[in-house]
């Protein structure tokens, strides 16, 4: 009996040593090994319930620690991988920009071929700002010269011979400027004729070469346009007794009749009688004859 008991104790000690060896070996097994498999390896042979439960708890605790560590490692690895990718992407972006900048700087600019002009080709029709500006300046200078010349002409004094007509003529002369209008001329005539001094200029008329001249026209208008009337030139104010024709019947001398100054009331009474019956209002667009001044 004593021998059998010693034999069982020896076996039990051997199993415990084997269990310890199995536990140390299990530390190096694959982390994916299940709890049951590791428990089987750690409890080979006969073990007490207390040892079995203790072994099981140790395996489960180790498993939980390994699982927690694995999860933490995965999260850390994922964060690091994401950070490395961003850093790499940024470095690549800066590298691309630097390379692009270097490429632009290093790229040789294309050489432009120098175009030669043909001096024999007429380029006057092409737009030229300097030439156009010079032409505008020249045109403006010519315009100003022309205007100054016209003002000089308008300020020239002329002597006008006229006849106060009341059925018979009473010749007089008056000085006016070429730029004066007919109303200004009649005002000066009124001062020379006692019968007209109390009369308004609107009630006076000026008849030249059988044409009634409206008050707003100036002597300059007839002079500059070399206008003519029915019986002679309107722009000449020297007086002859008649208009003497030269051998060519289609041409006349630069001679004219004295203009007539009349009262409007007289004209209205005798406009059906010669010479008033020949008179008509001047129309600048009407041709009063084919004569040309010699």
Image: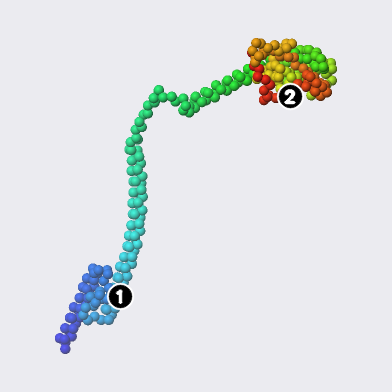
Using the rendered view, name the quadrant where residue 13 is placed: bottom left
Q: In this view, does 156 lie above or below 214?
A: above
Q: Is residue 184 left or right of residue 132?
A: right
Closer to the camera, 81 or 135?
Answer: 135
Q: Which residue lies furthest to the left in this view?
A: 3
Mark 2 sits on what residue?
A: 281
Labels 1, 2: front one:
2
Report the label total.
2
Of the image marks 1 and 2, the number of the one nearer the N terminus: 1
What is the spatial separation of the Cα atoms under label 1 and label 2, in whole angstroms?
A: 139 Å
Location of residue 129 in the rendering, given as x and y in whole percent from the top left corner: 49, 27
Closer to the camera, 117 or 100?
Answer: 117
Q: How crowded is mark 2: few (under 14 residues within 10 Å), some or many (20 or more)?
A: few
Q: In this view, does 158 lie to the left or right of 194?
A: left
Residue located at (82% from left, 17% from top): 166
Quadrant occupied by the N terminus = bottom left
Using the rendered view, name the quadrant where residue 155 is placed: top right
Residue located at (35% from left, 55% from top): 83
Q: In this view, does 151 lie to the left or right of 17?
A: right
The reply to whether residue 159 is in sight is: no
Mark 1 sits on what residue?
A: 57
Residue located at (74% from left, 24% from top): 281
Q: In this view, does 29 lie above or below 269?
A: below
Closer to the camera, 158 or 172?
Answer: 172
Using the rendered view, name the quadrant where residue 122 is placed: top left
Location of residue 233 in the rendering, given as x and y in whole percent from the top left corner: 69, 16
Q: Is residue 90 above or below residue 276?
A: below
Q: In this view, does 91 lie above or below 40?
A: above
Location of residue 290 in the rendering, given as x and y in whole percent from the top left corner: 65, 19
Residue located at (24% from left, 73% from top): 23
Q: Is mark 1 on a helix, strand or loop?
A: helix
The reply to whether residue 86 is in sight is: yes
């Amino acid at each position: 009996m004593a021998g059998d008991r010693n034999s069982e104790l020896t076996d039990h000690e051997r199993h415990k040593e084997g269990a310890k060896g199995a536990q140390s070996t299990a530390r190096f097994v694959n982390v994916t090994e299940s709890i049951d498999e590791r428990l089987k390896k750690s409890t080979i042979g006969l073990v007490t319930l207390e040892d079995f439960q203790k072994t099981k708890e140790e395996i489960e605790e180790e498993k939980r620690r390994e699982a927690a560590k694995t999860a933490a490692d995965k999260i850390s690895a994922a964060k690091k991988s994401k950070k490395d990718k961003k850093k790499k992407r940024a470095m690549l972006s800066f590298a691309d920009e630097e390379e692009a900048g270097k490429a632009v700087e290093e790229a040789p600019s294309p050489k432009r071929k120098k175009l030669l002009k043909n001096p024999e080709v007429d380029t006057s029709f092409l737009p030229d700002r300097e030439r156009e500006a010079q032409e505008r300046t020249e045109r403006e200078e010519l315009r100003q010269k022309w205007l100054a010349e016209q003002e000089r002409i308008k300020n020239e004094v002329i002597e006008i011979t006229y006849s106060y007509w009341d059925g018979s003529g009473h010749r007089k002369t008056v000085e006016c400027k070429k730029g004066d209008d007919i109303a200004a001329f009649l005002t000066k005539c009124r001062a020379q004729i006692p019968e007209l001094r109390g009369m308004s200029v609107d009630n006076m008329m000026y008849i030249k070469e059988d044409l009634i001249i409206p008050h707003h026209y100036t002597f300059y208008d007839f002079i500059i346009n070399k206008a003519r009337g029915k019986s002679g030139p309107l722009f000449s104010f020297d007086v002859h007794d008649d208009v003497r024709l030269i051998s060519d019947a289609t041409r006349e001398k630069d001679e004219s009749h004295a203009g007539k100054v009349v009262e409007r009331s007289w004209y209205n009474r005798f406009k059906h009688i010669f010479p008033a019956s020949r008179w008509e209002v001047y129309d600048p667009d009407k041709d009063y004859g084919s004569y040309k001044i010699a």
